[in-house]
Amino acid sequence: MSDFIQSEQKAAQAADGVMDAPSTDLVPAEPGKPLGPTLAGRDGPVRVSLVAEQGHVYGGESVTLFAQVEARAPVAGFVVRIRIPAGMDVETYRAVDSDLMPVFEAGASPDILVDPRTLAPILAETSRYLVWHVTTAQTPGDRHEYEIQVRVNPALRGDTVRAQATVYVADTPVDQETTAIEVRERAAYLKYLPALYAQDEFMGRFLMLFESFWQPIEEQIDNAHYYLDPQLTPARFLPWLASWFRLSVESEEWTEAKQRALLSTIIWLYRKRGTKHALLEYLEILTGHPVEIVEHRAKDFRLGGSARLGVGIALGAGNVPHMFGVHLQLDPYPRPDGLDDDAWAKEQRRREEARRRLIEELIAHEKPAHTHFTVEYEVLAAADATEAKAEAEPEG
């Protein structure tokens, strides 16, 4: 295992005592530990999703975690690492689409939780990690699923525990997701029943089923306004928001960050639609670089008594009226590992043709109907692309 993964593992282990600590009855023995590294954005070549079978469980019950890894760009392979927090015992596990077995890892030191009323330790366990190493080459759209069944320690009643999945490409973490499971002492719905049911364990467990079923719906209703905010909505909702404006962001060129930037300014763009400034903004969001638009006006054309028609009179570039030219700077595509020269040349040609087709369709869709255009492409070298991005970022 690389030094980077080892350092990230130690940081995640240091986070377990805080992130998995109870919010009321239980507290970590060493409060104030750092929470470890976080990943900004979800534009990596591989995306990981992690969900729990139920959002509410009793201590002592089992719950299944479902992880899915999806390739969004060609990669030589990946590593998915799932952290099972202290207090959850692994019972069964499997890779749904293969017989690949995981590697087990454990934290270097146990996380000790104490009862704040008596200061007595009630749980001393290490976090566990299940790691699947996938070495086969991945193409966009490839998916892999994993299931892990865990049993929750009864000592965690009243706590909220969090499992975490991280996916690595070439020893670099590219995506991460966390899911929370609330460990309850009793069903919350019991408060809506007569008091005589409060001590009925069967009724409490029965109502817990409905709480788990309704939790996702309740959360969506309570947080509905966040789904309409381009900066806060889940990534899978961005194409849905774009469809409100008859936009298609399904192309691989529209990364999550670009989709959010576009939808955050779409009202302004619609107000200025058909203007040079709106088209510039649109193209700069897509390419990530400054864009130049040159309007080709009439040459030697004048009105008055001296006006003459002839071969020397041109209404625009190529004798086409209402013509404008667009100059674009484009980033080069990074070469994925595991592709030979012929395969990479073919993949690069496919992506470049798709990108240019997308740009020209965008210009045709956003320009004034009576105008015509030409496009000049400049593919930057890797070093120039990095420098151009740095110059484009605002200071501070």
Image: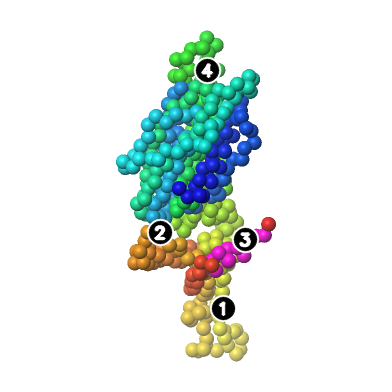
Q: Distance between the Cα atoms at labels 2 and 1?
A: 48 Å
- Element class at badge 2: loop
The answer to whether 344 is drawn above or below residue 116 in the figure is below
Q: Distance between the Cα atoms at labels 2 and 4?
A: 56 Å
Q: Left or right: 363 with respect to 69? A: right
- The residue wearing badge 4 is 190
Q: Distance between the Cα atoms at labels 4 and 3?
A: 54 Å
Residue 53: x percent and y percent? 43, 31
Nearest to N terminus: mark 4 or mark 3: 4
- Element class at badge 4: helix
- The residue wearing badge 3 is 393
At label 1, which amino acid type do we have? Arg
Residue 58: x percent and y percent? 48, 22
Q: Distance between the Cα atoms at labels 3 and 1?
A: 33 Å
Q: Left or right: 156 with respect to 251? A: right
At label 4, which amino acid type do we have? Leu
- The residue wearing badge 2 is 337
Which is closer to the viewer, label 3 or label 1?
3
Assess whether mark 1 and mark 2 are in contact (beta carbons under 8 angstroms): no
Nearest to N terminus: mark 2 or mark 1: 1
Q: Residue at x 58, y 55 (%)?
A: 265
- Element class at badge 3: loop
- The residue wearing badge 1 is 297
Q: Is residue 392 magenta?
A: yes
For disc 1, the neighbor class at 10 Å (few under 14, some 14 to 19, many from 20) is some
Q: Left or right: 11 with respect to 396? A: left
Magenta segment boundaries in residue numbering: 384-395
For disc 2, the neighbor class at 10 Å (few under 14, some 14 to 19, many from 20) is some
The answer to whether 95 is drawn above or below residue 378 in the figure is above
